[in-house]
Amino acid sequence: MIDGQLSSNHPKYHSPTSEEDRFLWLRLLRSRRVGATTFHRLMQEHGSAAAALAALPEVAAEAGVTDYRPCPEQVVRSEFKAASRAGARLICYGDALYPKALYDLPNAPPLLWALGRIELLARDKIALVGARNASSLGLRMARSLAKELGENDFVTVSGLARGIDAAAHEASLENGTIAVFAGGLDIIYPAQNQQLATDLRKKGVILSEQPLGLQPQARHFPMRNRIISGLARAVVVVEAAAKSGSLITARNALDQGRDVMAVPGHPFDARAAGCNMLIRDGARLVRKASDILEELTPIAPHQDDLPLAPQTSAPKPERGLRDTAKLHQAILRRLGPTPIAEDQLIDDLKTPARRLAPALATLELHGKIMRRAGGLLSRN
């Protein structure tokens, strides 16, 4: 039961409507070898968590796993009790409160534990990430960006790590910020951010897909990073080494069709190497918050304006707008600073010229791409 690609980003099954259903969803997700993608596949194939749980032993046997047992019920009861003590709320895939941007992810978290001002999940979000051993200038930049973005009604998203993450959360507490944990949301990591986590519970939101009480391990951080980038309209990297978790988040963002932006740094500073690489490869250079705001001028409705709940069908006009937005994202992902021929873009995207032409015109009008001599195209 290795997680594989889903056939659709929006599985056609209903969110749980009773406490029993929520219990079964959590039991299915906590069962051995069931990750997010496998969860969605099982729900698509069997229609309910109860049916999927009943089928698990046979599915496991077909994969060569004998004597398979789903997650014990007592484990799930204990998790619900721990959540109740912490005051956490369970948000299920398809719920009205579930962040709509996450429906874009083929491995979207089926369940999220949340603490704090959950209404912030419905607002536009920008992720600010960067180095743990950030420089003074980097910290100042993170605080400045977070504060001004908050004043422009954006919620900041980050991971409560030392350095850039913590600075972004602190500066945006009054206007809205979301911290995504790699472990259980009752496990503060690093411990030095205990007070900041307390403030977040009151003024922001803490999110985690992991069981309460789980100590974060290295393998949990890439999973956490996909949620950080998935929640946001754009990911801004303030400082990052050439090999860092922040660059993993940036790669996730590109795969998810999000904008990636970066603050440049001195070529001799290793903490700036990752940001400079991103800018070299086509990321928007950020000097101040207005650079981010200009890039996010909408060319299509915001994701949270679209009816993406998995159990309902979108009206045809809005689905068309969503398809257009996806095409814009695909074009921007394919283009970089090096010009390529329009015919090559058509071939790469496997999209008819009659559909690509108006999309290119729109992006060109909004300054997203440039048409150069000979009809070559590049990202602006």
Image (cartoon, rainbow, N blue to C red):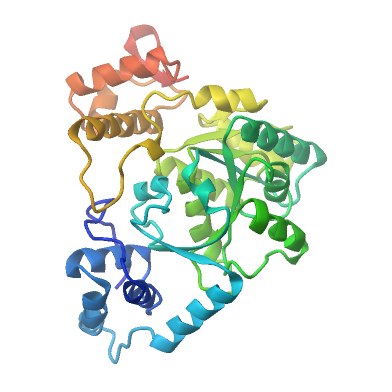
Which image quarter holds the N terminus?
Answer: bottom left
**Residue at the right extreme, as displayed:** 136
Look at the picture and state if 375 lies above or below 10.
Answer: above
- The percent position of residue 260, horizontal first and vertical second, equals 52, 35
Q: Is residue 275 left or right of residue 98?
A: right
**Residue at the top extreme, as displayed:** 373
**Residue at the front extreme, as displayed:** 18
- The percent position of residue 216, horizontal first and vertical second, equals 59, 69
Pick the residue in front: 354 or 295.
295
Q: Image point 71% across, 55% down: which residue?
A: 199
Q: Is residue 213 visible?
A: no
Pick the residue in front: 210 or 353.
210
Q: Image point 20% across, 36% down: which residue?
A: 315
Q: Image point 57% across, 63% down: which residue?
A: 182
Q: Is residue 178 left or right of residue 335?
A: right
Report the label total.
0
Q: Indicate the quadrant where residue 84 lies.
A: bottom right
Q: Image point 69% across, 35% down: which residue?
A: 147
Pick the residue in front: 53 or 268.
53
Look at the picture and state if 36 lies above or below 300.
Answer: below
- The percent position of residue 300, horizontal first and vertical second, equals 36, 26
Q: Is residue 321 left or right of residue 257?
A: left
- The percent position of residue 33, horizontal first and vertical second, equals 36, 76
Q: Is residue 327 visible?
A: yes
